[in-house]
Image (cartoon, helix red, strand yellow):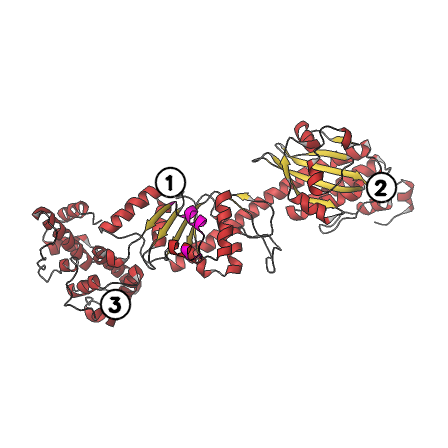
């Protein structure tokens, strides 16, 4: 709108005439300092500024814009907007406009009790205040000046009243040129504070919705990655004494929320154990997000774990919450924690100690509600001795350690695991396979499996791919490495139980340890049933027929020997 003679006759300032045109979202005319203006002009300015505030939904954009406009309108040396942290009952400066950037930087790091200073008084009473000389006001909190290096002479302060309660205070500090603030200035600030409070609450709600969307996006992405690399078995299969102890520890860990460190060789199913603990814990309804520390470059690991703000580094085009915040209410699984670079270990330790995380490019820490589960295939105590892993971090992570034995120490589990892998592999190909030849089970139980469960799974997968439809898996379907296992080596006791419906059970060797006949027979019966179940891929009806007993009788024995 042009500056017409009619406008000038009405006594309107040129900057006010510009405001009469509806401002675009990306710009608003900057008003000149307020001197003497008609009430209608002042109300019009308040309306136009309120509209401009409301159109900005990004808090990081809104606050600097609000402060910039208020500083120009009120002709002050500085404007500070203080927000209330209700959890700590503290006021902090999310942004400060000052002619000295160093002062603004120092203020950005300050927090003080919400009942201190003029700001605290305004927050408590809900009324604006004008203090012409702070040196004569006992409420003045001089520690802020001492820490920031700023000199405060006079203050205008107005509360920011939200829909339900006060959310902060806006302060105008020192009239430019050394003059005094008037009642008109305070009235204008109080009027603007109402629009500012509404705009801040809207921006906060918009930010929360956006952050929730980002957390869901991270969770969905992590879950998709999990599905892509998810283990092809969905539960832990074990009857061995070594794994019975692991199950006992898992049950105890699931009943608490303390950090758990799972140690064991590669391929033993450490992530499967972590998932089982989470699935049976009180946090089961929350997310389970996993990350392999060795798979993420060191330069990206901090951002991936703790998040970043837009503009924190080149390529950071939007806010990213990070896995710790995305896993809120659930658990985060840090696999291969021993491969984490030492500088990152220090940052992770701080997060675990403080229970809060600060995203890259942010100065405001956020409280965490997440359980930390971690795993390592290395001896972390040896890494501590070699100074490649922090001892203080180890004791933060290993509050409840669980060691997973290698497969060669739990050979009793091999027949059942092989049956499960066979069932899954035949469904995926698809192909009908009649089961395992007894000699095949014998070889599987003799082999030491340096790759542990994952290697066994791959071996069964390969055998099913080679076998023809309707065939039984024989040693010829196994890899040359397995076929090279010497049959002259005394087999493990589990291998002796491997039988089929077409073969007679092998006679077990006398046990070396002293044991009763009943215990020996029970142990043999358990092994024999496990082997027959493995041969028939876990099918109870076919296994019962092969054993010559009823399904009910077989179910009872399976329950007695914990073969379910």
Q: Which residues are magenta?
A: 385-399
Q: Point out residue 56 in the picture as x, y percentages from the top left corner.
A: 67, 47
> Can you see residue 216?
no
Q: Are marks 3 and 1 in contact (CB under 8 Å)?
A: no
Tag 1, which secondary structure? Answer: loop
Pointer 1: what residue? 256
Pointer 2: what residue? 177
Q: Residues within 10 Å of mark 2 (few under 14, many from 20)?
A: few
**Which label is found at residue 18?**
none
When asked about the image quadrant of residue 79, the answer is top right
Magenta-span inclusion, residue 395:
yes
Pointer 3: what residue? 463
* Horizontal arrangement in the rendering, residue 156 relative to residue 373 (left or right): right
Q: Point out residue 474 in the picture as x, y percentages from the top left corner.
A: 19, 68
**Residue at screen point 59% across, 42% down:** 205
Q: Residues within 10 Å of mark 3 (few under 14, many from 20)?
A: many
Q: Are marks 2 and 3 in contact (CB under 8 Å)?
A: no
* Horizontal arrangement in the rendering, residue 58 relative to residue 322 (left or right): right
Mark 2–mark 1 distance (CA, rounded to whole Å):
63 Å
Q: Nearer the viewer, residue 429 or 117?
A: 117
């Amino acid at each position: 709108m042009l500056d017409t003679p009619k406008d000038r006759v009405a006594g309107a300032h040129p900057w006010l005439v510009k405001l009469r045109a509806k401002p675009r979202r990306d710009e608003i005319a900057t008003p000149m300092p307020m001197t003497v203006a008609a009430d209608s002009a002042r109300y019009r300015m308040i309306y136009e500024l309120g509209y401009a505030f409301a159109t900005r939904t990004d808090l990081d954009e809104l606050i600097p814009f609000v402060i910039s406009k208020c500083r120009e309108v009120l002709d002050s040396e500085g404007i500070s907007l203080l927000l209330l942290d209700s959890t700590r009952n503290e006021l902090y400066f999310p942004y400060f406009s000052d002619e000295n950037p160093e002062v603004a930087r120092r203020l950005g790091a300050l927090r003080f009790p919400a009942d201190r200073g003029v700001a605290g008084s305004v927050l408590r009473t809900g009324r604006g205040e004008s203090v012409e000389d702070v040196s004569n006001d006992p409420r003045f909190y001089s520690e802020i000046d001492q820490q920031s290096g700023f000199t405060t002479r006079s203050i205008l302060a107005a509360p920011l009243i939200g829909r339900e309660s006060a959310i902060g205070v806006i302060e105008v500090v020192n009239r430019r040129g050394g003059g005094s603030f008037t009642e008109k200035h305070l009235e204008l600030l109080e009027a603007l504070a109402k629009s500012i409070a509404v705009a801040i609450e809207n921006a906060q709600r918009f930010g929360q919705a956006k952050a929730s969307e980002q957390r869901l996006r991270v969770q969905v992405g992590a879950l998709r990655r999990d599905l892509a690399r998810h283990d092809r078995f969905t539960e832990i299969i074990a009857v061995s004494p070594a794994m019975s102890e692991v199950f006992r520890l898992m049950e105890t860990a699931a009943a608490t929320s303390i950090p758990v460190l799972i140690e064991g060789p590669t391929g033993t199913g450490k992530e499967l154990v972590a998932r089982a603990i989470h699935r049976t814990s009180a946090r089961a309804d929350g997310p389970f997000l996993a990350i392999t520390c060795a798979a993420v470059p060191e330069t990206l690991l901090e951002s991936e774990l703790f998040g970043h703000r837009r503009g924190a580094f080149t390529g950071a085009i939007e806010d990213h919450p990070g896995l710790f915040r995305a896993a809120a209410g659930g658990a985060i699984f840090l696999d291969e924690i021993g491969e984490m670079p030492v500088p990152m270990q220090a940052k992770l330790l701080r997060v675990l100690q403080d229970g809060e995380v600060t995203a890259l490019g942010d100065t405001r820490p956020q409280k965490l509600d997440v359980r930390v589960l971690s795993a390592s295939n290395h001896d972390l105590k040896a890494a501590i001795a070699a100074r490649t892993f922090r001892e203080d971090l180890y004791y933060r992570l290993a509050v409840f350690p669980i060691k997973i034995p290698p497969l060669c120490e739990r050979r009793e589990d091999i027949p059942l695991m092989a049956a499960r892998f066979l069932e899954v592999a035949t469904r995926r190909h698809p192909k009908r396979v009649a089961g395992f030849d007894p000699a095949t089970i014998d070889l599987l139980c003799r082999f030491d499996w340096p790759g542990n469960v994952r290697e066994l799974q791959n071996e069964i997968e390969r055998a099913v791919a080679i076998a023809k439809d309707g065939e039984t898996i024989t040693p010829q379907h196994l890899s040359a490495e397995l076929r090279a296992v010497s049959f002259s080596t005394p087999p493990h006791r589990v291998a002796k139980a491997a039988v089929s419906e077409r073969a007679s059970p092998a006679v077990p060797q006398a046990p070396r340890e002293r044991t009763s006949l009943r215990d020996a027979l029970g142990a043999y019966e358990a092994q024999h049933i496990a082997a027959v179940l493995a041969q028939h891929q876990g099918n109870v009806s076919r296994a019962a027929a092969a054993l010559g007993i009823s399904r009910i009788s077989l179910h009872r024995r399976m329950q007695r020997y914990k073969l379910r």
